Amino acid sequence: MNKHDIDVERVGTNPGDPLVSLPGHVSHGRFERVLRAGNFAVTTEIAPPDSSDPDEVLKRASLFDGYVDAINATDGSGGNCHMSSLAVCAILTRVGYSPILQISCRDRNRISIQGDTLGAAALGVCNVLSLTGDDVGAGDHPEAKPVFDLDSISLTKTLRVLRDESRFLSGRKLDLAPKIFIGSTINPFVPPQHSRVNQLAKKINAGAEYIQSQYCFDIPVLKDFMKRAVDMGLTENCYILIGVGVLPSARTASWMRENVPGVHIPDEIINRLKSADKPLREGRNICVELMQEIKEIPGVAGLHVMAYRQEKWVGDVVKSSGVLAGRTPWSPDHSETTIGLVS
Amino acid sequence: MYKVRLWSVRHSRFMERLYNTANPGILLVLKGVTKIFGKRLDRPITAMEAGVKGFLFDCQMCGDCALSKTGMSCPMNCPKTLRNGPCGGVRANGMCEVKPDMNCVWVLAWDGASRMKNGDAIQNNEFAVDHREKGTSTWLKLARDEKTTDE
């Protein structure tokens, strides 16, 4: 094969076209390919805009070009209203990005979720992440009705039924099953810490093929968790990506610890930020150090960098950490983009 | 009652034993009653179940009782009504993300299960509840063999 053919095989003729599904792969997505090839993967999340402008989505995604293998589109994170994760994913797939559709159980029941999953697959989305979702009380519409028809494990099972059994939960057959790589989340850093590894086992039993964890700022807890996961054989059939964050200041860190559900930040990290001359710089240093330490922990398949309002630093921390070991993840050629208003 | 609910989870081993002892008798009586009276006594029996389990566990009468698989902590008291908890939002002190004054139902569940003889049942995945069953009696379903899984 000449170089052009290899490129076509790798990315398709049009970046938005689906790739060829490789043997043993459940999706035709790039993210699954990276993990199954044994690479150490890096993912990040995009903050969906409070806007109807598709260019804004692409602008935000382009910050990560060359540094990440997949981009999570959050689903009303923290209970706050933004552009929907499905729409963000659809915009991203049109230029060839590999987005991860986050589905939270907070806002939709099983009818809506199954419909959206089929729609997402039709729009070229290859990765889905099932989450419980933060409560409505945490966000900007606390008066809304929380749905929680499914929980994240029932949702994971539902996605497997759609894909593997090619049917709805009702039993009605699908003409074409969604070819999706199915993931879920874990938070090893909050109580009951001893049972969190069992919770992971339950998620893998339900069908999770990859896991993205909540923010990790506590290496000893993670090491203990991963050791137990490896001992139980949980990392054999599931890729575990650990969440890391870029903290801009001690004040933000303290605020997050108090107000964002499920975030555990040890005092040492906050003290380090407090005593630093340049807290912004120090926040990135902390992130880089954590990334390097986490990469060495057995069983970890990748990192999930969450840098809310610090997105411009994602590339910087990934590069400084060296976790990609010289690999450059695929990114689109923006000169060919024809989406949205031409600016 | 919140305090009674906490007591029940703390004594999950005892509650399990009590249930295992009393259950065959209760089911036998209910089987006889439903045979003789058909559906005519369904309402008082359902009310009795709601009263007893409501007092002991703050039961929400979901109609698909999972208490013996959730460490005697009723999952329907979780504000997110998770059937496979806990979520990742549990506070550092073990309290609920949504209701800071309430112990996380699922932290209690894993704790309760650890004391039970058949506590390992919590490791199995439960699918989301059938919302049509809300308000119906699990006891009657067992008596009529409509429900194959144990309470």
Image (spheres, rainbow, N blue to C red):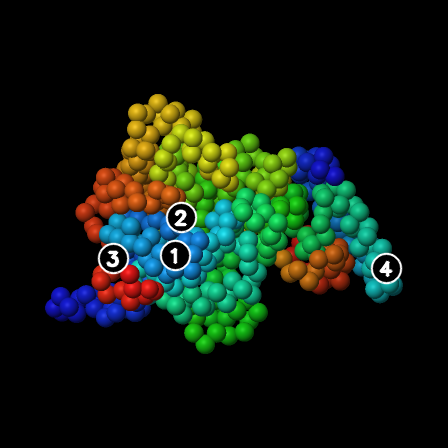
Q: Residue at x 65, y 43 (%)?
A: B73
Q: Earlier in the sequence, mark 1 or mark 2?
A: 1
Between marks 4 and 3 in the image, the one whose residue lies nearer the viewer: 3
Q: CA distance from mark 4 to mark 3?
A: 68 Å
Q: To which chain does the residue with label 4 belong?
A: B
Q: For residue A212, which numbered disc appears in the image?
A: 2
Q: CA distance from mark 4 to mark 2?
A: 51 Å
Q: Residues within 10 Å of mark 3 (few under 14, many from 20)?
A: many
Q: CA distance from mark 4 to mark 1?
A: 52 Å
Q: CA distance from mark 2 to mark 3?
A: 22 Å
Q: According to the image, label 1 marks what residue?
A: A100
* Amino acid type at mark 4: Leu
* Amino acid type at mark 1: Ile
Q: Position of residue A172 (x, y in %)?
A: 54, 74
Q: Residues within 10 Å of mark 4 (few under 14, many from 20)?
A: few
Q: CA distance from mark 1 to mark 2?
A: 11 Å
Q: According to the image, label 4 marks what residue?
A: B41
Between marks 1 and 2 in the image, the one whose residue lies nearer the viewer: 1
Of all residues, the one furthest to the front in this rendering is: A343
